[in-house]
Image: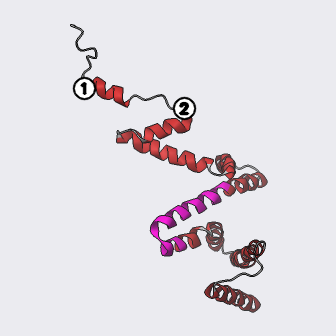
């Protein structure tokens, strides 16, 4: 050691010294630094965990996700049906939000046509599941009531809330003629079909 070369490091040590950074603070910081790792077996799982973390903290309703395993356990172990219903009722609130978030993200990537189809299909997932189970049981009236409730809530409740929200700041509103005609024809068909039952 003649002192002329103060840093005797091998290339491996130099590379390790360059990659060592200040320790990341908190879970988010550790996941973020894991996403930036050059090793794919670290960056892919860290990226997945980071996105999952970001999605879960994005909405306060996700606190209710704790009721999902509780509802499943309650149903499997044969608890009182009232408790099973209550636990699953609270569990479905964040799940509906996550389903809406996922379909919106897919719609942004796949385009308006496929995105609209996904929103129409998965946006009514509860009605779809109830209808399939009720049809298997042969309970046609439940299917009809579910469809009627879905149509009425979409036409009257959602459309009425849009009218109110739009009327707060505007004196006069403009609507798309095609959408208005479609809504009117769907409600007219429902009235006609309901009278024949």
Quarter of the figure with residue 128: bottom right
Q: Residues within 10 Å of mark 2 (few under 14, many from 20)?
A: few
Q: Which mark is residue 25?
A: 2
Q: Secondary structure at mark 1?
A: helix
Front-lying residue, 165 or 110: 165
Segment colored magenta: 94-116
Q: Residues within 10 Å of mark 1 (few under 14, many from 20)?
A: few
| Residue depicted at 35% across the width and 25% down the height | 17
Front-lying residue, 87 or 95: 95
Along the horizontal axis of the image, is 29 left or right of 159?
left
Q: Which residue is mark 1?
A: 11
Q: Earlier in the sequence, mark 1 or mark 2?
A: 1
Q: Position of residue 114 (x, y in %)?
A: 48, 73
| Residue depicted at 48% across the width and 28% down the height | 23
Q: Position of residue 176 (x, y in %)?
A: 63, 84
Along the horizontal axis of the image, is 21 left or right of 11?
right
Q: Secondary structure at mark 2?
A: loop
Q: Quadrant of the C terminus?
A: bottom right
Front-lying residue, 132 or 110: 110
Q: Is residue 24 magenta?
A: no
How many numbered marks does the figure carry?
Answer: 2
Above or below 8: residue 156: below
């Amino acid at each position: 050691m003649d002192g002329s070369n103060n840093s005797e490091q091998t290339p491996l040590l130099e590379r390790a010294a360059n990659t060592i950074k200040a320790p990341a603070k908190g879970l988010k910081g550790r996941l973020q630094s894991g996403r930036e790792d050059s090793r794919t077996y670290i960056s892919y799982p860290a990226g997945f965990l980071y996105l999952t973390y970001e999605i879960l903290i994005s909405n306060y309703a996700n606190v209710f996700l704790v009721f999902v395993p509780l509802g499943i356990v309650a149903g499997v172990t044969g608890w009182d049906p009232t408790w099973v219903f209550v636990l699953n009722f609270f569990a479905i609130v964040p799940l509906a939000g996550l389903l809406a978030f996922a379909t919106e993200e897919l719609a942004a990537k796949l385009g308006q046509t496929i995105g609209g189809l996904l929103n129409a299909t998965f946006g009514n997932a509860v009605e779809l599941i109830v209808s399939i189970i009720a049809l298997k049981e042969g309970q046609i009236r439940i299917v009809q009531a579910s469809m009627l409730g879905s149509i009425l809530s979409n036409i009257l409740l959602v459309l009425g809330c849009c009218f109110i929200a739009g009327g707060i700041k505007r004196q006069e509103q403009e609507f798309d003629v095609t959408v208005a005609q479609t809504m009117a024809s769907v409600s007219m068909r429902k009235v006609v079909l309901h009278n024949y039952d």
